[in-house]
Image (cartoon, grey):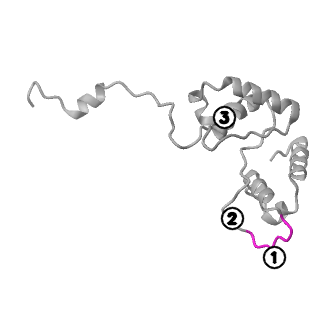
Amino acid sequence: MRDDCISARAIFDFAPRRRRSPFLGPRPFTARDESLFFGRSDEIRLLRGLWRRNRLTILHADAAAGKTSLLGAGLIPGLRADNANVLPLGRATSCQVWPVAALPGHNPYVLALLSSWAPEESPGRLAALSIDEFIRDRQALDRDGSGP
């Protein structure tokens, strides 16, 4: 090999390691990305206060404004660090379709949300529950030590 030529492998071995970029692209930040999520501490503090006072807090904004990231990498990890009993992020829409005859009278949005929180549960059992009943059942399990 010539003296003025360096192999690509040698360059790679000596190149400084790139730090993980704080920009994830189109996917939302999650708890795994908490260390990369910054600049939203005022919003996290406001949401934490609202949640502690009201328990039902609705977060709304334009599409792609960062709501899921704010919750997933900001608010929820902080609440869990305070030992709050926090459900995972839920979805009120689903790709699954349940036949009306099999689950008469069910609310498809409530069923989709409960299914996202408890994917191991049967849709028939979840379709019979309201959100309030689901949360009360979950709290009863937590008190018994069986946990969700």
Badge 1 vs badge 3, beta-carbon distance below 8 Å: no
Q: Is mark 1 on a helix, strand or loop?
A: loop
Picture coordinates of residue 76, whole percent (x, y)? 72, 34
Disc 1 versus disc 3: distance between alpha carbons? 39 Å
The foreground one among 108 and 137 is 108
Q: Name the residue under label 1.
A: 101
**Residue type, label 2:** Gln
Taking the magenta stretch, the answer to whether it contains residue 105 is: yes
Residue lying at 61% horizontally and 31% vertically, measured from the top left = 34
Q: Name the residue under label 2.
A: 96
The outermost residue toward the bottom is 101
Horizontally, residue 22 falls left or right of residue 102, namely left
Q: Mark 3 points at which residue?
A: 70
Above or below residue 133? Residue 41 is above
Q: Which of marks 2 and 1 is nearer the N terminus?
A: 2
**Residue type, label 1:** Ala
Picture coordinates of residue 75, whole percent (x, y)? 71, 32
Residue lying at 71% horizontally and 44% vertically, measured from the top left = 89
Q: Residues within 10 Å of mark 2 (few under 14, many from 20)?
A: few
Dominant secondary-structure state across the stretch colored magenta = loop
Horizontally, residue 23 falls left or right of residue 52, namely left
Horizontally, residue 74 falls left or right of residue 79, namely left
Instruction: Find the magenta span and give its range.
Output: 98-106
Picture coordinates of residue 12, whole percent (x, y)? 29, 31
